[in-house]
Image (cartoon, rainbow, N blue to C red):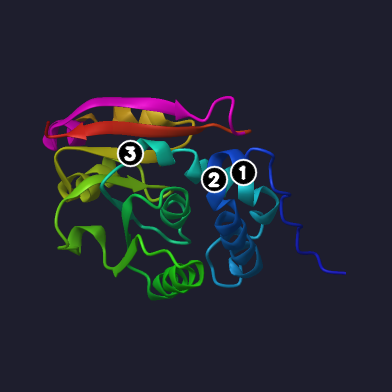
Amino acid sequence: MSDTPPVEAEPAAAPTVFGARIDLARRFTASLAAHGEERGLIGPLERPRLWTRHVLNSAVIAPLFSGRVGDVGSGAGLPGLVLAIARPDVEWVLIEPMERRVAWLQEQKADLELANVEIVRARAEDWGGGVLDAVTARAVSALRTLIPVTAPLVRDGGELILLKGASAQAEIDAAQKQIRKFKLSGVAVDVVGEGVVPEPSRVVRARVRA
């Protein structure tokens, strides 16, 4: 018998979050469950919580975005590919430096026919693709390290919308120097998805040079 843990059953909230795009979300989740560990995209313990902790955690923040949005350190496509599935009306730029992860993102873009996705192999600080309306990131680094590589990508008046965990406010407190240096305003933690998904998401939101 295999000791591979089973994949989490699709939560009842998933069709509500993805609407008509739920089939694409199912295909992406199935691909990640089947190949994510062997390709170094997810850890061995993530399959039993793949929907709740990763896919829905990413997707539930989709209503916060508009325009052209960057996902820094997109990795397995969490949140970038998931957000592109949920919001086909938004243009997503997935910025990822690692070749094997870029290959995965390109495969998924093609398989899911995501015309609203651009994939860039680069570090965020080296990308020269122009300013964005917003930037997001998930599980990349602490806020004090993340602000200097994300804020310069955003237009004046644009937004950082960064997925964080329970320590979000502590990260804000530790990043006051960077918040001042990059002229961020309205920095706050928002909880998104309460009453919709089993585990609501936390995002740090900040206006850039507004």
Q: Residue 62 carries which label?
A: none
Amino acid at circle 3: Ile
Residue 80 appears left or right of 92? right
Q: Which mark is residue 161?
A: 3
For label 1, the SS is helix
Read off the residue under disc 2.
Answer: 18
Residue located 64% across and 62% down the image: 30
Query: How many numbered badges does the structure rendering display?
Result: 3
Quadrant showing the C terminus: top left
Q: Dot 2 surroundings within 10 Å: few (below 14), some, or many (20 or more)?
A: many
> What percent of the width, then of the height, locates residue 56?
56, 43
For label 2, the SS is helix
The answer to whether the residue labelled 2 contacts the one labelled 1, judged by CB atoms less than 8 Å apart, is: yes
Q: Dot 3 surroundings within 10 Å: few (below 14), some, or many (20 or more)?
A: many
Nearer the N terminus, badge 1 or badge 3? Answer: 1
The answer to whether the residue labelled 3 contacts the one labelled 2, judged by CB atoms less than 8 Å apart, is: no
> Closer to the camera: disc 3 or disc 2?
2
Amino acid at circle 1: Pro
> Closer to the camera: disc 1 or disc 3?
1
For label 3, the SS is strand
Question: Could you say which quadrant of the image residue 162 lies in?
Answer: top left
Q: How far apart are marks 2 and 1 (CA)?
A: 5 Å
Residue located 44% across and 57% down the image: 81
Nearer the N terminus, badge 3 or badge 2? Answer: 2
Magenta run includes residue 94: no
Residue located 40% across and 53% down the image: 88
Read off the residue under disc 1.
Answer: 15
Foreground of the two, 178 or 151: 151
Q: What stretch is highlighted in magenta?
A: 177-197
